Amino acid sequence: EIVLTQSPGTLSLSPGERATLSCKASQSLSNRYLTWYQQKPGQAPRRLISGASNRATGIPDRFSGSGSGTDFTLTISRLEPDDFAVYYCQHYGDSPPYTFGQGTRLELK
Amino acid sequence: QVTLKESGPVLVKPTETLTLTCTVSGFSLSHATVGVSWVRQPPGEALEWLAHIFSNDEKSYSTSLKNRLTISKDTSKSQVVLTMANVDPVDTATYFCARISRVDYDLDYWGQGTLVAVSS
């Protein structure tokens, strides 16, 4: 089973700052099926980044994804008030379970 | 317009079987490049992937819950059903269904979720 470990658990930043969120896999994701989601309280998750680095339709270009193998990163270049939420990564590796990370809470400093 | 909507009981007793239905619109469950996944989220906790099913009836399950889960689909009704046997209070969660695309194996559209409590 591939375990995804997200860090930090909580990130406290101010609008305009840059956010860097990490997702580390316990085994290499050779197929790069690594997705980032944003979730706000009381809402369903929203897909942000697919295939490790492809922004989903309608997602602002301040969101970017990078990485391969076991190390993946979500970067938000200039935080806006609407970006404060919980972020999850999920893999679709070679076999189930297709786990999520435990999440990073991005909070207003 | 793609939509998914979960339905099912609000309250289930321990040891009972939970049956959840996901009704989809805007796409067909017979389409080769999409499927439906179930994901749950206990209150205040992280997301947990449960199962998925594709048009060719390919199914996958969470390894920890595999013995208790069954996923099926009725293409004519545009519905995907997830059953969970022998529920326990730790199964209390919001249950989401989401469309999965075979392009990037991502969950591109989500239902609003349904909160299920397990309690006697």
Image (cartoon, coloured by chain):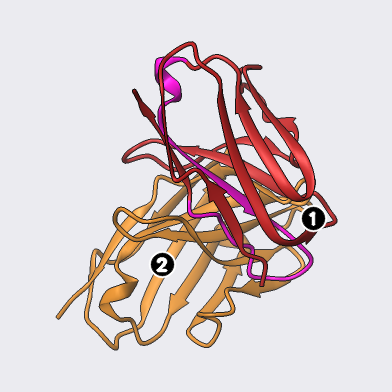
Chain colours: A red, B orange
Secondary structure at badge 1 equals: loop
Which residues make up the magenta segment? A80-102
Position of B68 with respect to A68 (left or right) is left
Main secondary structure along the magenta-highlighted residues = loop
In reply to whether residue A91 is colored magenta, the answer given is: yes
Tell me the quarter of the image containing the C terminus of chain B.
bottom left
- The x and y percentages for residue A36 are 61, 41
Q: Amino acid at mark 2?
A: Leu
State the image quarter where residue A50 is shown: top right
Residue drawn 75% across the image and 32% down it: A54
The Cα–Cα distance between marks 2 and 1, rounded to whole angstroms, is 23 Å
- Tag shown at residue B42: none
Image vertical order of residue B115 relative to residue A11, above or below:
below
Residue drawn 24% across the image and 63% down it: B10
Secondary structure at badge 2 equals: strand
Q: Toward the viewer: A91 or B104? A: A91
- The x and y percentages for residue A96 are 68, 70
Image vertical order of residue A21 relative to residue B20, above or below:
above
Residue tagged 1: B32
Q: Earlier in the sequence, mark 2 or mark 1?
A: 2
Q: Amino acid at mark 1?
A: Ala
Judging from the image, mark 1 belongs to the subunit labelled B
- The x and y percentages for residue B80 are 54, 64
- Tag shown at residue B20: 2
Image vertical order of residue A5 relative to residue A44, above or below:
below
Tell me the quarter of the image containing the N terminus of chain B.
top right
In reply to whether residue B57 is colored magenta, the answer given is: no
Position of B111 with respect to A24 (left or right) is left
